Image (cartoon, helix red, strand yellow):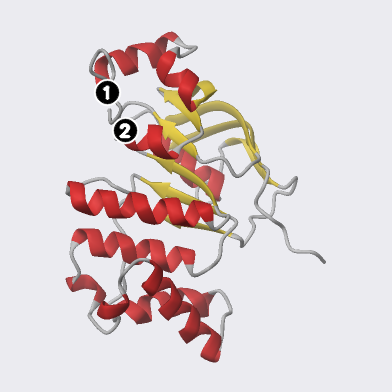
Amino acid sequence: MASVTSLPIEALGVTVRLGGHPALHGIDIRLEGDAPVAVLGANGAGKSVLLRTLHGLVLPTEGAVLWSGSSVRPRDQAMVFQRPVLLRRSTLANVEYALAVNGVRGDARRSRAHEALARVGLEPLAARPARVLSGGEQQRLALARAWALRPRVMFLDEPTASLDPAAATEIERIIGEIRAAGTAIVFTTHHLGFARRIASEIVFLHEGRLTEKTPVGMFFKSPRSAEAAEFLEGELPWPPSHDS
């Protein structure tokens, strides 16, 4: 039996209630290509819940998520959280553990772990305990751990949040390399300049509802929904700069 692959990802009438409170309302969306997708919206709009639902970590209360037409969650995807959960092990061992859980054995596991750390510039810190790394280094480790799995799709929840400008720039560079290597990227962010530089398409949520799914240039120039226009008016300087 062939393994299920991630793309296309479809949400069909997805509603999610958490603790009795609605977080997503009737979401219909289809993600099918390699173009990076940024999920935007105000605090509490449901961005992180949507990401987790598309990844399969959160189950819809109503509706369904399909991966390549199947309700079986595929293995060829990975997720990086805003606050990475790191094991009390070395930097290298954190990557090796993720590979072991996913069935990679022996020399191949060690080789892929070293390769992933080298790609994010952490190879010199391979023996260092992961939990003493700086915030930016920990996020790079989380990206390396996910990238080592060679996912078809990578979900990133606020990947540059709480990082200083230098660390955020390095994370952006790494994400660009992951994308160039053929992994589809779906991410949430509050940094609109980051969204403009990385994304090809914007998914905008307002109070748990999808108000538009629009090419990035059109979204920032002429959003289709009143909610998105109000959001941009409150978030962007006018006239908008290249980095805002």
Circle 1 Cα neighbour tier, 10 Å, few/some/many (<14 / 14–19 / ≥20): few
Residue 217 in the image: x percent, y percent? 47, 23
Residue at image x 74%, y 49%?
Answer: 70
The residue carrying mark 2 is 193
* Residue 237 in view of the camera: yes
- Figure check: 113 above or below 167: below
110 above or below 229? below
- Measuring 52% from the left and 43% from the top, which residue is drawn there? 53
Which amino acid type is shown beneath numbered disc 1? Answer: Ser
The residue beneath circle 1 is: 241
| Residue 81 in sight in this render | no
At 25% across and 16% down in the image, what residue appears? 234
In the image shown, does 65 or 82 lie closer to the viewer?
A: 82
Where residue 95 sits, quadrant-wise, is: bottom left
- Front label number (2 vs 1): 1
Q: Are marks 2 and 1 in contact (CB under 8 Å)?
A: yes
Give me the residue at 55% from left, 50% from top.
56
Determine whether the residue tagged by mark 1 lies in a helix, strand or loop. Answer: loop
Disc 2, SS = helix
Q: Establish if 238 lies above or below 142.
A: above
Q: Position of residue 143 (x, y in %)?
A: 39, 61
Q: Please state the horizontal and vertical placement of residue 211, each as a whole percent of the image.
A: 50, 18
Q: Amino acid at mark 2?
A: Gly
